[in-house]
Amino acid sequence: MADLTVSGFSACPACDAAPLAQRLADRAEVAQGTLILSLPTAHCATCIADVEAALSGHPGVRHARVNLTLRRVTVDAPGLKADDLIPVLARAGYEAHELDPDALAATTADRQGRDLLMRIGVSGFAMMNIMILSVAVWSGAQDATRDLFHWISGAIALPTVVFAGQPFFRSAWMSLRAGRLGMDVPISLALVLASAISVFETMQSGHHAYFDAAVMLCFFLLIGRYLDHRTRAIARSAAAELTALEVPRATLLADGAERVVPVAALRPGDLIRIRSGARIPADGRIVEGRSEIDRALLTGETLPVPAAPGQMLSAGEVNLTGPLTLRVTAAGRDSSLARLTALVEAAEAARGRYTSLAERASRAYSPSVHLMALCSFAGWMWATGDLRLAVNIAAAVLIVTCPCALGLAVPAVATAASGRLFRRGLLIKDGTALERLAEIDTVVFDKTGTLTLGSPVLVSLDSLPADLRPAARAMAEASAHPLSRALAQALADEPAAALTDVVEHPGCGVAARWGHRTLQLGRAEWLGAGDDEADNPHSATWFAVEGREPVRLDFADALRPGAADCVARLRGAGLSVMVISGDRQAAVADLAGRLGIGAYHAGVDPRGKEAIIADLSAEGRRVLMVGDGLNDTAALARAHASISPASALDAARVASDMVLTGVDLAPVADAVATARCATRRIRENFAISIAYNIVAVPLAVFGMVTPLIAALAMSLSSITVTLNALRLRD
Amino acid sequence: MEILSILIPVSLALGAAGLAAFVWALRSRQFEDPKGDAERILNNRWDDRPRPD
């Protein structure tokens, strides 16, 4: 429990952000024949059967098995590639993504978890056997029979404690060496003292032996340890899964040939080619080609920016329409991605380290337990002068105060809460995230990619004359530009006209001939249509047919599903909601109006976002930041708690405490409610274990605790705490 | 009380057998996908004969 806050993730999001590919540089080749696919939508028995049947029916697949806990399918299919199987699953109605088995290697073989389970099993069976004998002793076995039972109990208990208690002994030793008094020190002391005294008492034909207590202690505490481990392992493997989805590579132009290399291998001065639709891997200057650049992840702008030779581009931007050749000016740790490092580090330091409830409890607990045991030992020595009696009572105090309930109080609730949120599509990455989330009073959203999907939707279909629609559809299909794709989607029901001489002018638009007429689809300046972009909340493109008035087509950024509902529920829960975006004033105002959010800031740069969060914190507000872009990273790290969608950049996901696994934004509101509920349960659990100690400790100090009372109290409190935590499940 | 000399070894043997079964289940990775196992029981595809390996 003391290590509850040790996260499995890098302490510094910026370090992960900077070299997008460092970790991938020396990655080994993918294991032959085995494919791992992520199945984000699988959730029931039918899904398992469908997926396995669909894959097994595909030629070349030898074996397919779904793991529903991790929402993955492992396919044994030598010679097949993920690209062959993803369409098979898509036809069966399941979304699937390829995962890199190497990136997952560390999490699939959960050796630590199985190791803990083994120790739980051994101590469980030992506990049952010893309990049979102990019940006989408690119900009145005498003399030789009692001694025999004690000896047998000891023969089972000693090896069990040596084996099952290792996690506690190891962590106690480590905390002692570091000069701290962790929770595991009194636990180890109780285990050792109880075993030693019981052996001594058995040799002296004593009445009481605590073998059952020692083993039971191991059993309950190991369960708490295992729950804690499991919550973290599931979150870690899912986070590794998100990372495994992205494989950053760059196309290097050297000696007139193209070569695909890891991004980490790029050096300043290298020439790289960026095809349209690809993310720019390193900072550089355009040498050749014209295109448009989507900078949404860096700045929050929804409108693409034109790009021409001589212009500087930053890593993380997306090239939209034409292929570009780039001379690398800075790569890896020097790139603009890495320049956010300092900002994020400073933001994290400013937030400070959060002290979890469990830590606060264990800080108060360890010294007081040692003190109490020592006092009762000294008191009884002074009163009776009987060393054997005094040691016995000190041991009883240690056993009775042992934090079975305390050790289960937090992990049991965390398991129940994170399981509930995971089923709703939210992944908790940090142990203290739930507690911090429960305290928030302000929610700050980023706009592009968070409240919206970052993909445009046509809103002015009516302005397009019906006779031009087939031509417009054919034009739109000729380009990969997001606005073109949105137009093609809006006109999907129209027939497509036959066009000739289709030419895409990167950075401008598409031109073609329709019969004898010339068609143009693209930017206002290129078509010669006057337009003032700044006041319009929508992105626009123009469609011109020779001899007709150009038509303006408006696009709005589509709202993320559940966004309106989520904002309404957060406000209903008494939280103030705010939007901060790097986008234009008009676009942000339009969105805030649609969602009924009164407070918004537009045109804010990354530093400004962090400053706004810092100001809010200085006012004493606890802020939850929800964002997806690189420009949000520092704000995410600075906020009291943070959430990012799965579509966010690696750096943003690493900086946040929780990740939304689905598209829907509604789990954010669920998360706040669940977190508040979970924190309440944790406090209740602490109250239960304290109440039990208030009853049991005086009994122990005054020498009235028998092994029977210790066993009863220990199991009752542990079970109560676990049941209380389970009330959180749905 | 002579019965103890039979009953105690019997109870120990039963406990050991249970532990052995648990260790076997753990080693053969039967605790890897608890949620999937809970759902698989609802599937009647292999009810009549076991899945061929």
Image (cartoon, rainbow, N blue to C red):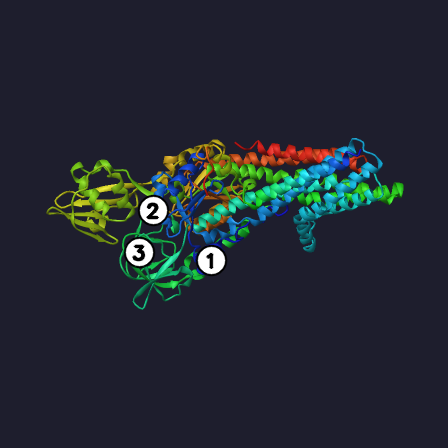
Chain designation of label 3: A
Tell which circle, 2 or 3, labels the residue nearer the N-terminal end.
3
The answer to whether residue A416 is visible is yes
The amino acid type found where label 1 is placed reads Arg
Q: Quadrant of residue A153?
A: top right
Labels 3 & 1 near each other (Cβ < 8 A) = no
Kindly identify which numbered label has been placed on residue A302.
2
Local crowd size for mark 3, using a 10 Å CA cut-off: few (<14), some (14–19), many (≥20): some
CA gap, disc 2 to disc 1? 31 Å
Q: Are marks 2 and 1 on the same chain?
A: yes
The amino acid type found where label 2 is placed reads Thr
Q: Nearer the viewer, residue B22 or A599?
A: B22
Residue B8 location in percent, x, y?
A: 74, 37
Label tally:
3
Residue A317 location in percent, x, y?
A: 36, 53
Residue highlighted by disc 3: A275
Q: Check disc 2 and report its element: helix, strand or loop.
A: loop
Chain designation of label 2: A
Kindly identify which numbered label has been placed on residue A608.
none
CA gap, disc 3 to disc 1? 24 Å
Is A531 positioned to the left or the right of A11 in the image? left
The amino acid type found where label 3 is placed reads Arg
Q: Does residue A723 lie above or below A513 as drawn?
A: above
| In this view, the mark in front (2 or 3) | 3
Residue highlighted by disc 1: A23
Residue occupying the point 71% across, 34% down? A692
In the image, farthest residue toward the bottom? A255
